[in-house]
Image (tube, coloured by chain):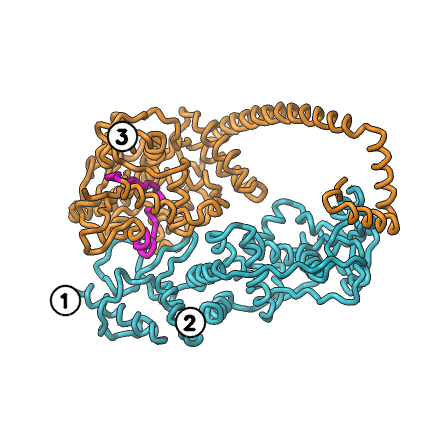
Chain colours: A orange, B cyan
């Protein structure tokens, strides 16, 4: 039996977090069905991707050292132990260089021009640029970016892609280029495109497409996961960007992640669903339509396996009431600000209660210690040591005593 | 029938073969297409131009040549770029480039990645522990982190570990601009730092100096600690040997601005290979001694930051004098003096190191 690796390399904002959550939580069910999803934690494949692509990520890179080789080793082991299929999935893999892709494929057992190697299938989930462009800006803001939406749009329209923003955006979003890099050594029939349905469709449709692409149909999976990457509205994203401008200098990445991204963005501001949604500016629609049309034509020409409809990449027409995040309604931003302050106050109150509890616990421990030290002989010895430590002769005598008793008594 | 793509690729592979044997002809001046395909894919323009620069600087070893051609630049930035003129029909991906027109920063990403990968492979045996001297002064050095850590390391190597009950604490200082440069250097050779400009901008945004540079604050913190003897500020470093009970101490060497910047970038790439403590150890014990030999000055405070740095220096001086903390040296030496931005190319230095270390 040919062993297969399904390598899902992107793109971001296409339901990847949900998919990875389902795969992670159902590892055992999948294993029983002959599908390996080797991961010891939710972000195992993310760390492997960071390692493969040599990407620093707010200090996380220390946890990523050697992670790709570990993952590739687990995949090879699973396949040699009888699993017919192994799945690797992370969306930032989309931006890997040809050299990194070569290394990745080789480490998974792929052999160029040889039939005996592992059969690697590439899966790329894709969504229309009309939604991807604002979503990527928002994702940048949730990762400490301070730039306005207009500046972001300017950067991604720079034909040279000389800035970091533009280089990253097209690295993970330009579908034909991603497929050029990742698919260079694979037959088109081993390249599978999963399109994200247009907004307003049946919510389970995307999962059905993923299920088909990954061969999960017929397996009883628990699909009720909680892990997703919720989106924010216009005033909420503006508020977050302003917070970044003010707080970035002081707030370490390790604190930013739980406080700003999790507490504020995901747990608080994303619940404000009535505010205007981020959208592509209407004047950019013609450019995006033209670009999307060239992509669709190119993908059709290459003959990949498309799961869904390439027409999904066209995107929705311009919104009637475009809300510009660079010129938001300040009232809405202030309202989002009040929600943010409230969330921070509540969290602060929770921490204060926790602090009080720990203080009480500490006081108990101190009391117990003091009672243990309250013996007369301990007090005399303590008094003597303090006196001796304050003079050169005393310190010398203490040194002689400690050497005589051995080093273990030094702290006595 | 050969296409323009075939011709372009053949020309590129011929150029790579030329670079492999030490050639220095720029891509746009290269015309020969007399070479077979030598690999699965063409290396990026950044890697090829770096190799050409290495060839211009000397004769890189075959190992180094292979490493350059197989490298990918670490971190975020432009991806591996294609050579202009290889595939005129290409419609997707970043625009192809003339490699000679690439900025130093693009080449540095590749170079620092290679230096970091090399550094990560270096095995350093820890120095044998020096027997602690029985007769020694009890001391602790604080303040300027570059000076304090370097002098402490020298004293420890001489069998004089810091600490002990009743120890004297010497808070080392220099002019505030130098202390800021030292703080940045210490972080760059440690667990990482932003660039000098961003470092200064961050300090300014915080509206307070780094904790260890705020000398009166350091004195206050140590005075509040139990089992601490006298705490004083030392601005005249010539007096330090006497204070710590030795005849002499080697002066602490500074690393010039561009060399520190190189260390910072190598450190960022090194963090992808080793844990933070090992990163600091490798940067400090392997790279730093080499970079101390580089000529050049400390980074200068740019004009837009001079006012607040001067104000901060003046405030420290006043606080020290008002509190009557013991100061060895002239408190006026805390005030920064204007300095010119130092010259020195980070890329040239990276190439020099690559030739030495990996070559």
Residue B105 appears in view: no
Q: Position of residue A268 (x, y in %)?
A: 48, 27
Query: For the residues tagged 1 and 2, is the chain the same?
Result: yes
Is A362 located above or below residue B228 in the figure?
above
Q: Which chain hosts label 2?
A: B
Give coordinates of residue A384: x percent, y percent. 87, 40
In reply to whether residue A78 is colored magenta, the answer given is: no
Q: Chain of mark 1?
A: B
Vertical placement of residue A112 versus A347, above or below: below
Coordinates of residue B23 in the picture (x, y in percent): 35, 76
Q: Identify which residue is drawn at 60% across, 67% down.
A: B292
| Label disc, if present, on residue B2 of the rendered structure | 1
Q: CA distance from mark 1 to mark 2?
A: 33 Å
Real-space Cα separation, disc 3 to disc 2, in angstroms: 51 Å
Q: Which residues are magenta?
A: A82-104
Whether labels 3 and 1 share one chain? no
- Chain of the residue under label 3: A
- Check residue A100 for magenta coloring: yes
Give the image quarter of residue A86.
top left
Helix or strand or loop: what does disc 2 sit on?
A: helix
User: Which numbered dot is residue A207?
Assistant: 3
In which quadrant is the N terminus of chain B drawn?
Answer: bottom left
Discs 3, 1 touching: Cβ within 8 Å:
no
Of the two numbered discs 1 and 2 on the same chain, state the one appearing first in sequence. 1
Q: Judge depth for marks 3 and 1 and give the one in front.
A: 3
- Which of discs 1 and 2 lies nearer the camera? The answer is 2
B147 on left or right of A4:
right
Residue holding disc 2: B54
Circle 2 residues within 10 Å: few <14, some 14–19, many ≥20: many
CA–CA distance in space, label 3 to label 1: 45 Å
């Amino acid at each position: 039996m040919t062993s297969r690796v399904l390598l899902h390399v992107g793109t971001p904002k296409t339901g990847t977090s949900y998919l990875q959550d389902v795969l992670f939580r159902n590892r055992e069910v999948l294993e029983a069905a002959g599908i390996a999803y080797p991961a010891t934690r939710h972000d195992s494949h993310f760390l492997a991707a960071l390692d493969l692509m040599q990407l620093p990520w707010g200090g996380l890179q220390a946890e990523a050292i050697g992670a790709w080789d570990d993952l590739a080793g687990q995949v090879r082991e699973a396949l040699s132990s009888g699993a017919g299929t192994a799945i690797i999935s992370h969306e930032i893999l989309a931006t890997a260089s040809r050299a990194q892709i070569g290394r990745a494929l080789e480490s998974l057992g792929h052999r160029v021009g040889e039939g005996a190697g592992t059969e690697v299938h590439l899966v790329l989930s894709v969504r229309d640029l009309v939604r991807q462009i604002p979503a990527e800006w928002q994702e940048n803001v949730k990762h400490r970016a301070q730039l306005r939406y207009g500046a972001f749009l300017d950067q991604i329209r720079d034909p040279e892609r000389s800035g970091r923003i533009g280089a990253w955006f097209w690295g993970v979003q330009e579908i034909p280029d991603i497929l050029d890099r990742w698919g260079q050594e694979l037959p088109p029939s081993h390249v599978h495109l999963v399109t994200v349905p247009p907004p307003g469709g049946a919510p389970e449709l995307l999962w059905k497409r993923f299920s088909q692409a990954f061969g999960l149909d017929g397996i009883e999976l628990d699909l009720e996961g909680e892990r997703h990457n919720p989106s924010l509205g216009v005033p909420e994203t503006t508020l977050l960007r302003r917070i970044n401008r003010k707080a970035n200098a002081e707030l370490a990445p390790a604190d930013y992640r739980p406080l700003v991204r999790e507490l504020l963005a995901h747990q608080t501001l994303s619940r404000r669903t009535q505010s205007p949604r981020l959208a592509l500016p209407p004047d950019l629609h013609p450019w995006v339509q033209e670009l999307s049309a060239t992509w669709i034509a190119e993908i059709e020409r290459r003959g990949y396996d498309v799961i869904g409809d390439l027409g999904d990449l066209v995107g929705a027409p311009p919104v009637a009431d475009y809300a510009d995040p660079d010129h938001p309604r300040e009232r809405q931003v202030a309202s989002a600000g009040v929600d943010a302050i409230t969330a921070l106050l509540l969290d602060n109150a929770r921490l204060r209660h926790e602090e009080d509890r720990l203080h009480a616990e500490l006081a108990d421990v101190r009391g117990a210690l003091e009672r243990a030290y309250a013996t007369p002989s301990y007090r005399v010895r303590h008094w003597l040591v303090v006196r001796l430590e304050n003079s050169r002769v005393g310190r010398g005598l203490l040194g002689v005593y400690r050497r005589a008793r051995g080093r273990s008594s030094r702290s006595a | 029938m050969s296409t323009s793509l075939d011709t372009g690729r053949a020309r590129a592979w011929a150029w790579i073969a030329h670079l492999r044997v030490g050639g220095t002809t720029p891509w746009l001046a290269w015309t020969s297409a007399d070479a077979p395909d030598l690999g699965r894919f063409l290396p990026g323009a950044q890697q090829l131009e770096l190799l050409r620069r290495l060839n211009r600087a000397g004769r890189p070893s075959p190992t180094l040549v292979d490493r350059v051609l197989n490298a990918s630049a670490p971190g975020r930035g432009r991806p591996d770029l294609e050579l202009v003129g290889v595939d005129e029909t290409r419609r997707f991906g970043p625009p192809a480039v003339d490699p000679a027109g690439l900025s130093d920063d693009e080449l540095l990403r590749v170079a620092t990645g290679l230096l970091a990968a090399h550094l990560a492979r270096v095995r350093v045996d820890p120095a044998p522990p020096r027997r602690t001297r029985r007769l020694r002064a009890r001391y602790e050095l604080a303040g300027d982190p570059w000076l304090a850590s370097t002098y402490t390391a020298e004293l420890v190597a001489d069998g004089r570990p810091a600490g002990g009950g009743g120890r004297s604490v010497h808070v080392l200082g220099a002019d505030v601009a130098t202390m800021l440069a030292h703080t940045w250097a210490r972080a760059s050779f440690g667990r990482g730092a932003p660039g000098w400009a961003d470092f200064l901008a961050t300090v300014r945004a915080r509206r307070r100096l780094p904790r260890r540079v705020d000398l009166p604050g350091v004195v206050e913190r140590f005075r509040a600690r139990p089992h601490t003897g006298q705490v004083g500020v030392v601005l005249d470093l010539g007096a330090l040997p006497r204070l710590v009970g030795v005849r002499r101490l080697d002066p602490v060497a500074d690393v010039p601005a561009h060399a520190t910047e190189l260390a910072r970038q190598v450190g960022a790439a090194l963090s992808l290979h080793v844990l933070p403590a090992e990163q600091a150890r490798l940067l400090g014990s392997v790279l730093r001694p080499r970079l101390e030999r580089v000529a050049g000055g400390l980074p200068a405070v740019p004009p837009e930051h001079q006012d607040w740095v001067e104000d901060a220096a003046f405030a420290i001086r006043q606080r020290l004098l008002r509190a009557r903390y013991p100061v060895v040296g002239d408190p006026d030496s805390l005030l920064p003096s204007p300095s010119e931005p130092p010259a020195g190319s980070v890329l040239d230095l990276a190439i020099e190191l690559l030739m030495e270390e990996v070559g």
